[in-house]
């Protein structure tokens, strides 16, 4: 049986549902290109900020139980570098999603227009960085702000717009308002604010004290959020959080995700993880007699 793993993500055709999550490989074009060549269906850039940022002092990463804690501090060369990075990273047929982290609506607006003009295939607004003040969670929790932001940008760009949310009390309201204003989809979820302590030094491990938790520990939370968003809005979702194998990816798809973001597990398994996951999904579809992956999106809601 031939099976079709391609999906339409708000108008973007992906050869398979795997997407390199933002930030995990840093900001180098070469690495984005390698991810595309390794079989990812699409790649997301590191979040660009308006001005270049050096990020925090080390230690910026710590391994914790069932995951990774990071506080990189949105280190990136500033949004003007995106044009060069996009052109160097591009390989045919693999969309590039540009992630943006502005500190106000004007910055987001300018960067989104620049991304569109620079050849990005979509923009993802990072509204959920858990460790940089005024550039993430604070703005992502304010439904009025998010509605204004999305409405403002949507009228000025021609490419799909995604918002990236984290774990907040009011994510349902925030996403509802963003979708009303024309957001094309949601990336769920970003890392979750957390911390770890060195018991011998008797102080927090990360220089920033707090970091964002990613990896298997957050997977069931991301599944729940995906399920809720699909149930309420039939939203287009990039399910992200703790995907290590095809079972994790399929869980997201059945919950309602159209595509799957993959981050932390790349540090353990390398870039071939995309191919491995695609192979596993193909086998599952053959065994289950499913011809089109799109038929599985949100399937649990049918039961
Ligand atoms: C080292 C590191 C850097 C990250 N940088 C960004 C970033 O710049 N922008 C963003 O939206 N998410 C960033 N993330 C979050 C990931 O894109 C992803 O949402 C999160 O890690 C959950 O997926 P995972 O469990 O597969 O890693 C980063 C995650 C890690 C581990």
Image: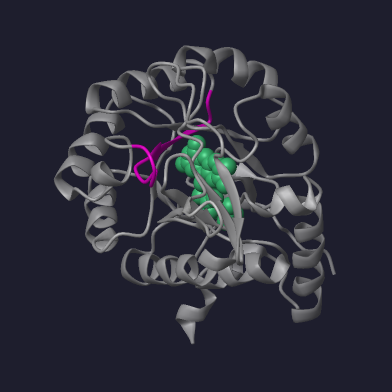
**Point 64% across, 64% down: residue:** 249
**Point 33% across, 44% down: residue:** 183
**Point 39% across, 39% down: residue:** 126
Figure label count: 0
> Quadrant location of residue 32?
top right
Quadrant of the snapshot with the N terminus: bottom right
Q: Is residue 130 magenta?
A: yes
In percent of width and height, residue 141 lies at 24, 51
In percent of width and height, residue 15 lies at 70, 47
199, 89: nearer the viewer: 199
**Point 63% across, 61% down: residue:** 243
Residue segment shown in magenta: 120-132
Q: Is residue 12 visible?
A: no
Q: Is residue 115 above or below residue 100?
A: above
In percent of width and height, residue 145 lies at 18, 40
51, 112: nearer the viewer: 51
Q: Residue furthest left?
A: 144
In percent of width and height, residue 214 lies at 54, 56
Q: Residue furthest right?
A: 1
224, 303: nearer the viewer: 224
- Predominant secondary structure, magenta span: loop
> Quadrant location of residue 252?
bottom right
Q: Is residue 28 above or below residue 187?
A: above
271 sits left or right of 8 in the view: right
275 sits left or right of 72 in the view: right
Q: Is residue 113 visible?
A: yes
Q: How is the image coloured?
A: one colour
133, 300: nearer the viewer: 133
Q: Is residue 272 magenta?
A: no
Q: Is residue 64 above or below residue 43?
A: below
């Amino acid at each position: 049986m031939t099976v079709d793993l391609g999906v339409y993500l708000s108008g973007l055709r992906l050869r398979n549902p795997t997407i390199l999550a933002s930030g995990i490989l840093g900001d180098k074009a070469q690495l984005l290109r390698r991810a595309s060549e390794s079989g990812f269906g699409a790649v997301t850039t590191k979040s660009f900020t308006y001005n270049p940022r050096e990020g925090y002092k080390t230690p910026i990463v710590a391994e914790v139980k069932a995951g990774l804690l990071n506080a990189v501090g949105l280190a990136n060369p500033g949004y003007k570098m995106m044009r060069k990075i996009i052109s160097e990273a591009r390989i045919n047929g693999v969309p590039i999603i540009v992630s943006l982290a502005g500190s106000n609506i004007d910055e987001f607006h300018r960067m989104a227009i620049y991304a569109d003009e620079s050849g990005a295939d979509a923009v993802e607004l990072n509204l959920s960085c858990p460790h940089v003040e005024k550039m993430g969670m604070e703005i992502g929790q304010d439904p009025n702000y998010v509605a204004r932001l999305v409405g403002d940008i949507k009228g000025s760009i021609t490419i799909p717009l995604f918002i990236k949310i984290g774990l907040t009390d009011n994510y349902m309201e925030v996403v509802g308002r963003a979708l009303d204003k024309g957001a094309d989809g949601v990336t769920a979820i970003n890392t979750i604010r957390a911390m770890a302590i060195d018991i011998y030094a008797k102080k927090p491990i990360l220089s920033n004290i707090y970091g964002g938790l990613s990896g298997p520990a957050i997977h069931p939370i991301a599944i729940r959020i995906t399920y809720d968003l699909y149930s309420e809005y039939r939203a287009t979702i990039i399910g992200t959080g703790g995907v290590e194998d095809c079972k994790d990816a399929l869980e997201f798809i059945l919950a309602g995700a159209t595509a799957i973001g993959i981050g932390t597990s790349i540090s353990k398994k390398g870039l071939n993880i995309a191919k491995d996951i695609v192979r596993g999904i193909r086998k599952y579809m053959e065994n289950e007699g499913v011809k089109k992956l799109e038929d599985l999106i949100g399937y649990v809601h049918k039961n």
